[in-house]
Amino acid sequence: MEAMAVNPSDRLSGVPLKNPPQIIPSASQNPILQSQQPPQFPTYLEKPDVSPRARILCEILTKALPHEVETALSNTRIEPLSEIVEEVLKLSYAYPTAAVKFFRWAGMSRKHSAFAWNLMVDLLGKNKLFEQMWDAVRSMKQEGVLSVSTFVSVFGSYCSAGRFNEAIMTFDVMERYGVKPDVVAVNSLLSAICREENQTFKALEFFERIKTKIAPDADSFAILLEGWEKEGNVAKAKNTFGEMVIRVGWSPQNMSAYDAFLTTLVRGLQTDDAINFLRVMKGKNCLPGLKFFSNALDILIKQNDSAHAVPLWDIMVGSGLLPNLIMYNAIIGVLCNNDDIDNAFRYFDEMVFYGAFPDSLAYNMIFQCLIKNKKVREAGRFFFEMIKNEWPPTHSNCAAAITMFLDNDDPEMAIEIWDYMIKSNVLPLEESANALLSGLSNMGRLSELRRFAENMFDRRINIDDSTMSKLKQAFYKEGRSSRDTYDSLSRKWKSS
């Protein structure tokens, strides 16, 4: 460290390594690198809780001329304590050249912490200054502060730059730098590769090569399974999951792996397999938590797949998990969309027993489903239940219900809904008003038709031309006196 303290810039600028990883083509030759956007790093300007001394040093790094940085730093008379150095480095990723000068200056007066060294390696790597990054790694070896954490940073920097082969080569040279690779290093490299788009096959290649030397653990498989989930590769997910069960067995601690695997199956339209696996997992006491079921239900709803939503739901509730109101509304919604009234009512009725009380959305989805399926008696009873529990139907459901009841010879129930709308001020009224007048016209209920039409005109409710045509047809076919009645209504309509 003494040599580094005297002139650390020599170490960080160009000392060759004995066994550096092979360099792949530059960005101009590599389409992966060409497509990447420049990284955005936080600075002290965006951080409100920067310490006063660190802020002064950061301002120098960002504003001082390159040849004046070290002099300016010395003039502050700020002692570069480890915590100050670490804080400044965290905020200096956007200024790598100045950060190197700061690191050298701070190293003149005291030995750097292992964390500061790791920050320096990460800073250089994230800025794709890979030669200088390796110079820092070599210096760390000489100082005896290299660790797996250092190499984890290198893995991430290479992978974020699309240089996966070099990340893997870095793993291969760890022992030459005195750090024994272990399963933590394996998992860190797998994770760094899988974080990038469509690179799980590359991670699998490394996994297949290394698993005979370093035994994978549950996290190794979880990382791969999450990669297959992101890429939607069902076949590979099944292979990886099968190998996981053979190698590490079943355990409730492996829930992230199970979640990823099952979600891949559901999203890949293999929900039958997912449900079968869920039943097996239940027997192994490895059933996923509410998060998986909520996500899976969301996927099935987007697929409009009520057939699989029901057994999935029943496994969830049967295992003691308590769905919330949002989940109940989701399952009721997909069942209503598929006209599965029986199951929709079943879940609606059981909600309160699991602590989820129906809201306006739940009531109106059930009511709408009854209307759509022309369940006249059930819809009438349900309407009274809604208003009794103070969850009134929406104006659009009221209009649809009025039409349905009139089309099915139940004008009394249609009028009941209209009267409720007037009494409770359910707005807007136009759609329901036109539905009521049209239905009464079709049924020839002239006395009620006249009474409601006059009331609507007095309220200045907008009645459509097409509705008035139906009124005219209904009144005109009943003789002269009825014609006079219509003509009087028409004059009121035009003046309203």
Image: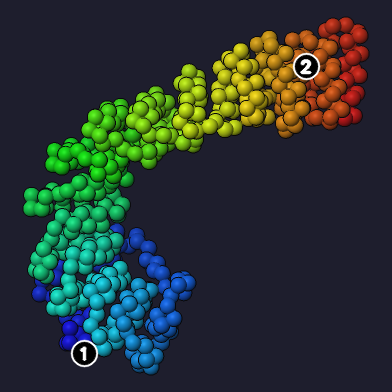
Q: Is residue 314 above or below residue 267?
A: above
Looking at the rendered structure, the secondary structure element under dot 2 is helix
Q: Going by the image, does 345 lie left or right of 420?
A: left
Q: Is residue 430 above or below residue 28?
A: above
Whole-percent x and y of residue 365? Answer: 56, 27
Residue at position x 18%, y 68% from top?
147
Whole-percent x and y of residue 276? Answer: 27, 27
Classify residue 485 by image quadrant: top right
Say what amino acid the circle numbered 2 marks: Lys
> Can residue 245 be seen in this snapshot?
yes
Residue wearing tag 2: 470
Residue wearing tag 1: 6
Residue at position x 88%, y 6% from top?
479
Looking at the rendered structure, the secondary structure element under dot 1 is helix
Q: Going by the image, does 186 lie left or right of 418?
A: left
Is disc 2 surrounded by few (<14), some (14 to 19) or many (20+) residues within 10 Å?
A: some
Whole-percent x and y of residue 110? Answer: 25, 85
Label 1 to label 2: alpha-carbon separation:
99 Å
Residue at position x 41%, y 69% from top?
42
State which quarter of the image contains the C terminus.
Answer: top right
Front label number (1 vs 2): 1
Residue at position x 77%, y 19% from top?
437
Snapshot colouring: rainbow
Instruction: Pick whichever, 161 or 401, lies toward us.
Output: 401
Instruction: Pick whichever, 377 or 373, lies toward us.
Output: 377
Q: Going by the image, does 330 lie left or right of 258?
A: right
Say what amino acid the circle numbered 1 marks: Val
Classify residue 39 by image quadrant: bottom left
